[in-house]
Amino acid sequence: MATVYRLSTAIFWLLVALAGGVALFAPAPPEAPAVSPATRGVTPAELAAHATEEDCWMAIRGGVYDVSAYLPEHPTRPQVVLPWCGREATEAYATKLRGRPHSPEADRLLETWRIGSLAAP
Amino acid sequence: MSRAGLPPEPGRLAPVRALAAPMVALAGMLLPVAWAFPAGLPFLRAAGIVVAWAGGGLLLASLLMMVREVRLAAALGGLERMTRWHHYSGMAAYLLLLLHPLLLAAEAVRVTPAGAWQLLAPGLSPGAGDVAVWLGWAALLCLMVGLAATFSAGLAWRYWRWLHALLGLGTVLGFAHVQWLGIGLGAVLGGVVAGVLLLWRLLRIDAGTAARPAVVRAVRTVAEGTVEITLAPLARSLAVLPGQFVLVAFLSGPRYRGCGEFHPFTVSGHDPDGALRIGVKALGDCTRRMQSLVSGVAARVHGPFGDFMAGRPECPQFWVAGGIGITPFLAVLREGRLTQAVRLLYLFRGGREAGWLDELQALAAADPLLTLTVRETGPRPPPVDALLPEAATLRGCACYLCGPPGLLGALEAALRARGVPAAEIHFERFDFR
């Protein structure tokens, strides 16, 4: 068992080092094209019609985002995010876990899913 | 004496008890996976989540199997089996939890080549820094260091036990990592179970609240570096069968500074008034200190455990004792006359290391069914082949072995080579680290 421990631990650190090496030497990804904010108005009623795992829109800080394609990639389990589909989710987004906001990277990623702005009812 | 809760036969565990420990490990692995099985995620990400829950569950199973309660040990096939599955579950959990970040990183590579590193080291990547991930790293490092200590055979016990405890801390940090990811129910359940098991072990076993109070009634030097200690119960006495062992801690008093740690000792005798006798050989710091024990010292006794000599078959028997390994056989012989022919081979290194020799010779002289052979082997491991009887005389014999691990291994191999079936070779290992 000691041999299994030593071998597995050594392989683990080798793979972690490999990931670090790839990040160090890999060419920088091209800048993401600026996303022009969509200006289409989305009413709360229309927003509420997209409240499923397959079709999930959220309103965050005035913008409306179709995050359906991203949900499977989200780090937490779907159950954490799904209740916010079809709803105003600014507060949930701003207080991700224990009151912490999402990272700037998450903000940038979010913009790629923008489909419009929240309109008055 | 009551036999309640004790197994009927050594080496022939009922299938339910033989499978109990592996079943607990399997359930520990599968239940959380079934609850948290991720549907609809990319394969590598799903696999990364599955191995994490399986590893977390196995850690809980491993924690359960370090709780040395008498009834739990009996239900799970004995303390030795529990300890073995404590090791297996812990090691399997470690391997799965090593895979967890690697699989998630492999999925991240699909998005961008640098994605794996961004996932593994978010704090070092611009604009990130996820407490959950760092908690995961802290948990994994605790497991890594704890296991490194576990496999350090030469590490002193006082350091070993604290470093080994990092495995418990790693488990708790692991569930904190889950909590920080927002998976509240799983984290709370896992954390509570881990906390309860750790507290159970700490309070009931390590602090000795599960043990019964006793006092040292007598201490007798029986060989060089070996004493026999008589422990009189201060509460209800333990129901101990010959061949069983107890965990004993000696406390500090005016004339003795006890280690306060529980160590396993085979019971060498059980007096009619409930007093237990244990043989203690100076093998480490704590047992060396026990050589200077005096009557009146307070102790705590937990057990009994084991089924080494229980349910012996109605056939001739061959017993081999190496050094202090004579104690379970002595306990049987002290109980009364034998009902089957027994050949007892008592091996000792030399000098004055053979304890209870006069008493054993007197017992052999008084019981025609007992044949005692005493052999001095010298400081090196003995050539066991030359010490064992011919294969023909072992046919139909049940063999019982007790001694240091190296000797046990050599004896078992030599007996198997003489055609003794594995089911007829009984021994118990006392390595509970």
Image (spheres, helix red, strand yellow):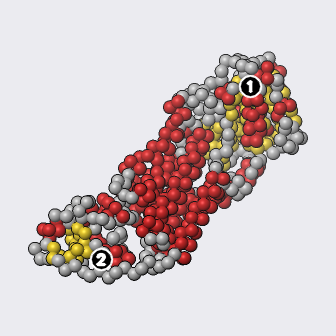
Q: Return the x and y of residue A13 as percentages of the image width and height.
A: 59, 65
Say what amino acid the circle numbered 1 marks. Answer: Gly
Q: Give the x, y percent position of residue B376.
A: 87, 36
Inspect this view and state whether residue B402 appears: yes
The chain that hosts pointer 2 is A
Q: Which residue is drawn at 48% across and 43% down?
A: B26
Q: List the single residue furthest toward the left.
A: A121
Q: Which chain carries label 1?
A: B
Please name the amino acid that badge 2 sits on.
Glu
B281 lies left or right of B61: right
Q: Between residue A18 and residue B187, name the one nearer to us.
A: A18
Residue A21: x and y in percent read 56, 73
Residue at x-position 54% and y-position 76%: A24
Q: How many numbered discs sit on the rendered protein?
A: 2
Q: Viewer-proximal residue, B259 or B145?
A: B145
B42 horizontally vs B306: left or right: left
Residue bearing mark 2? A111
Q: Mark 1 points at which residue?
A: B419
